[in-house]
Image: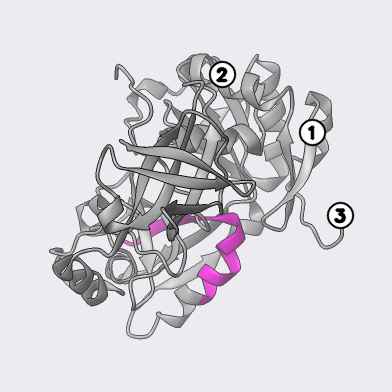
């Protein structure tokens, strides 16, 4: 694979049977033992993902809070030290630059975790909006390794490798200087699967050791295939599918993370206020199909009229049926509405359902 980057964990993939593909400019494992068994392992036990391709940018200085709050849609002023927050970066017209997680360590010390394929673009965006703010930003992605341990037994596995009481790290909170098997780590109770678990950061030179230590403790390595089905079942967006420069967070159905009433301005605020006031022209809905297998990019029709496009679709490993999300005209978005999806040039019926695909007890 020419001009494809590799994470520091690359050499470890083969040890666990990794089958690699090119993804967002990186060579990564699509699966180890198979998509469905890996998916089910995360839903019932635990799995470990190499996510060292993700981007990390530090923001430090007396205006760090105001600077970040101006960039993102959520209200960063509500964060306390040791907390994380999901966020969206928007263009002035309301389209999405990227989605990210903001980590607050202190009032002048933050970390932004961004999507791998957008790291360079996002960093340029951050630099373009520095004027007037006393902050220093640094792209620390090249020095940073990251793994994610996800699943109902994630804490049980990782706890055996550290003296830190992981039960004290609340959901969407983080803790620095956690010693995991002799490696100094930043640990957050976050993830991209809809399950409990942790995202664990350390220096790139130690991340392969960390990955193998956790895998050898009995946690199944998981590839990109199951990562996508897991996040999709949990109604979590993927940039380039549920979000892009043409799809706003309101259209994508993540308006909860857009605080139009927060103090101060943020990039895209006026466009999003206008969009909300005038009413959406389209939105992303969930759907199910009795036959056929939906895929990203498949066209959606009502009669002979094209009304939208599938953003994500799969035979759900957890539910055993074909489900998906589609960006459709607003008049076709009501629950129970039916439309057709062009699957290999054949129209297959689909019904609009809730995007809360998984019914979980917690």
* Res. 224 image quadrant: top right
Residue at left offset 53%, top offset 67%: 138
Answer whether residue 140 is magenta in the image: no
- Position in image of residue 176 (x %, y %): 45, 40
Eyeballing the image, is 58 above or below 316?
below
Residue 347 can be seen, yes or no: yes
Eyeballing the image, is 251 above or below 43?
below
Residue at left offset 28%, top offset 37%: 336
Mark found first going from the N terminus, 2 or 1: 1
**How far separated are the C-alphas under marks 2 and 3?**
30 Å
Eyeballing the image, is 130 above or below 90?
below
Mark found first going from the N terminus, 1 or 3: 3
- Position in image of residue 28 (x %, y %): 73, 44
CA neighbours of label 1 inside 10 A, class few (<14), some (14 to 19), many (20+): some
In screen coordinates, is 279 left or right of 96? left
CA neighbours of label 3 inside 10 A, class few (<14), some (14 to 19), many (20+): few
Task: Identify the disc placed on residue 194.
Answer: none
Answer whether residue 114 is magenta in the image: yes
Local secondary structure at mark 1 = helix
Local secondary structure at mark 2 = helix
- Position in image of residue 91 (x %, y %): 38, 74
Task: Identify the disc placed on residue 1.
Answer: 3
Label 1 sits on residue: 12
Residue at left offset 60%, top offset 69%: 120
In screen coordinates, is 110 left or right of 58? left
Q: Nearer the viewer, residue 176 or 201?
A: 201
Label 2 sits on residue: 40
Residue span colored magenta: 108-124
In screen coordinates, is 35 left or right of 197? right
- Which colour style is shown? one colour
């Amino acid at each position: 694979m020419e001009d494809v980057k590799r994470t520091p964990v690359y050499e470890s993939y083969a040890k666990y049977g990794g089958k690699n593909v090119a993804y967002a400019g990186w060579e990564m494992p699509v699966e180890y033992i198979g998509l469905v068994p890996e998916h089910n392992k995360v839903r019932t036990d635990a799995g470990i993902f190499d996510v060292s391709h993700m981007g990390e940018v530090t923001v430090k200085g007396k205006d760090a809070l105001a600077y970040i709050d101006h960039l993102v849609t959520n209200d960063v002023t509500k964060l306390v030290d040791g907390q994380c927050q999901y966020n969206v970066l928007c263009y002035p017209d309301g389209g999405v630059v990227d989605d990210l997680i903001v980590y607050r360590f202190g009032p002048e010390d933050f970390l932004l975790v961004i999507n791998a394929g957008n790291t360079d673009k996002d960093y340029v965006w951050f630099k373009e909006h520095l004027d007037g703010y006393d902050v220093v930003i640094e792209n620390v992605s090249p020095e940073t390794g990251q793994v994610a341990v996800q699943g109902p037994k994630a804490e049980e596995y990782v706890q055996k490798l550290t003296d830190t009481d992981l039960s004290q790290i609340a959901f969407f909170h983080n803790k620095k200087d956690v010693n995991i098997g002799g490696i100094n780590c930043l640990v957050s109770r976050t993830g991209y699967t809809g399950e409990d678990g942790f995202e664990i950061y350390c220096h790139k030179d130690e991340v392969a050791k960390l990955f193998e230590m956790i895998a050898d403790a009995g946690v199944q390595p998981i590839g990109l295939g199951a990562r996508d089905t897991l996040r999709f079942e949990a109604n979590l967006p993927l940039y380039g599918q549920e979000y892009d420069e043409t799809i706003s967070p309101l259209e994508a159905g993540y308006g909860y993370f857009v605080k139009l009433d927060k103090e101060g301005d943020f990039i895209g605020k006026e466009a999003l206020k206008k969009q909300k006031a005038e009413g959406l022209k389209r939105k992303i809905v969930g759907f199910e199909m009795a036959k056929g297998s939906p895929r990203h990019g498949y066209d959606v029709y009502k009669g002979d009229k094209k009304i939208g496009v599938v953003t994500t679709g799969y035979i759900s490993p957890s539910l055993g049926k074909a489900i998906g999300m589609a960006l459709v005209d607003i008049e076709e978005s009501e629950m129970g509405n039916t439309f057709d999806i062009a699957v290999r040039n054949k129209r297959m019926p689909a019904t609009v359902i809730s995007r809360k695909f998984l019914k979980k007890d917690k």
